[in-house]
Each structure stands twice: as structure tokens, then as C-alpha cells.
Amino acid sequence: MHYKKGDKVKHPKQENWGLGVVLENQQDEKVRVFFENSGEKILSTKIFQPQIIIGNAAQHPILDKLQDNSKFLGLTILLNNFLSKFPNGFQDINYLEKEVYHKQGISDFAHKVLSEKIFLQLLVKDEYATITQLIKSIIHKDTLSLIDRFEKIVLLETLDHTDFQKEFVCSLYALLYGNTSDFDQNFIEFARVLSEMRVSKWTIMTYFLFIFHPNKYIFLKPSVTQNLAKICEFNLYYETTLNIITYHRVLKFAHYLFENLKALGLAPENMVDIQSFIWIAGRD
């Protein structure tokens, strides 16, 4: 039996590998196959001859769109694992209840209590303590702890010190509502303030951007995001020190995921879906 690129197959002895697709025409007695549950394998047809699957049993929403690209292969494994937990993807009710509704609720609350108009009105009146209390109320709203519990405690305690409140709220306003052309500089300034406060963490740096602008900015959990980027062979240029270069790369990775998940049949709505996908897939 000769296998050609695009053939759907199953391994005769490894049912748990699931359906596979032949990635290139058979070379001599070896065939390269990508299996939905175990990734890429090179099989010797002298030892095992995969069973060719045809008809309805050969149809697969992911494998049908698979590209012969190692980065895409890694993403396909992650997507398959995600769908094993949430079969209806980003519209799965269990997914929405576990991941989306809570984050969207925090975002809605943040815009209600500290919209650009309210923020500016309080800022003009030098109401730094009031703004700080509103920021703390947003952080308290997050019962899922996007920010690590210990980091959250330190941040909340630090915000009680009046020495930091003015710089914190002014730099945060510029970051959230400043001109797009000034974003890099505002990012660097907010990072500097966090460093002075000794709460210089990526989660804190990106939390407010994500909560106030979930259509545009991604929340960075370093470990899981690095795990996912490695699987997709995407270089984040990651550094523990807050810097705009890393964050631009993280944003680019988020958009890479957005476009490719869309191409694979999912329909991410915004960065909440992308952040949730990173968190769920990256932990595994």
C-alpha cells in the first residue's frame, strides 16, 4: 500500500492516537503522519501499515485544514486538547462560564466606575485617593485571581501608601487613555512607576490594559504564555524585566493565535478568548 499526502489514516495498534493525516507522499518504506491526539510520527510501513480512512469517518475540522508547517502542527495539538475540554470551542457554555463571563464582568465594572470621563474628572481635581480606591475595587472584583494572590496583596498594600498614589494613577491614566502614538512611552513610564513601588510584575503591568481594553491588549501570564510560544516556535524575546519589546512580541503572538485559530475553524471574539486559550492550553 502506498500513502500520499492528504490521506486520512489510523494506526492499527494505537487507537488512542486518533485520526491522522499523511503530511507528504510516502518515501520508500516510511510515511510521515500527523495524528490528532499525539502529533507527528514517522512510521515504517514494514512494521505497521496504517489503515486508510475514507468517507464521513475521514472528515475532521482540524486535520482538513492542516498545513505542512511545524508551527501550525503545534497549534493544532493545542487546539485539539482545548476542544476535548470544550467541544463547542469559544461558544461552549462551560467555557463561557469558567473563563469569559467573569473577565467580561470585571471589564464592565471597570468601565462603569472608572471610565475615561470619570477618571479625567477626578484627576483634574487631584482626587488621587479616590481614584486609588476605585482601582482597588476593580482588583477586588477579580475573584479568579488573574493576578497571583500574593502579588495582589502586595499591590493593594502598596497602593495604601499616599507617596505612590499620584504617580500611579497619573501614569495609569496615560497608559489607558493616552494617545496611541504615545503608547510605548506611556508603557515605559508605567513600568518605571511599578518598579519604584516594587510591584514590577508582568501580570500587574498588563492587567489594566487587558481589563479596560480587552479588544486590543493581552494579559501576560509569563509561564503559560512562554510554554505556548515554545510549542508554536514563536520567539517572545521574553525578559522578566518589564520592557516594551517583549510586550510587542506578546501582542504579535496573540494576533498570530487569533488569526490561526480563526483559520482552524474557531471564532475568537477578542483577547479574552485568546488569553483564556493561552491559560487553558499552556497549563497542559
Image (cartoon, rainbow, N blue to C red):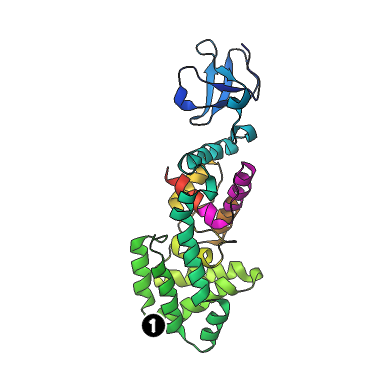
Left or right of 259, for residue 133: left
Q: Residues within 10 Å of mark 1 (few under 14, many from 20)?
A: few
- Which residue shows up at 36% across the image and 64% down it? 151
Q: Which percent across, then down, holds residue 100?
A: 49, 57
Which quarter of the figure has residue 248? bottom right
Q: Magenta part mainly helix, strand or loop?
A: helix
Q: Which percent across, then down, holds residue 278?
A: 49, 49
- Provide the secondary structure element on which disc 1 rests: helix
Task: Inspect the magenta stretch and tell me whether residue 257 lies in it.
Answer: yes
Which quarter of the rendered picture does the C terminus lie within? top left
Q: Is residue 61 among what the camera can see? A: yes
- Which residue shows up at 44% across the image and 77% down it? 134
Q: Residue furthest bottom?
A: 125
Task: Inspect the image, locate mark 1, and give the three-letter code of the amino acid beneath it.
Answer: Thr
- Which residue shows up at 50% across the image and 27% down it? 18
Q: Nearer the viewer, residue 270 or 207?
A: 270
Task: Inspect the magenta stretch and tell me whether residue 2 lies in it.
Answer: no
Left or right of 157, for residue 273: right
- Which residue shows up at 62% across the image and 13% down it? 28
As displayed, is residue 177 above or below residue 92? Answer: below
As displayed, is residue 234 above or below residue 77? Answer: below
Q: Which percent across, then down, holds residue 20?
A: 56, 26
Q: Give the residue pinned by disc 1.
A: 162
Q: Nearer the viewer, residue 261 or 84?
A: 84
Q: Is residue 22 among what the camera can see? A: no
Which quarter of the rendered picture does the N terminus lie within? top right
Q: Nearer the viewer, residue 214 or 83?
A: 83
State which region is magenta: 254-275
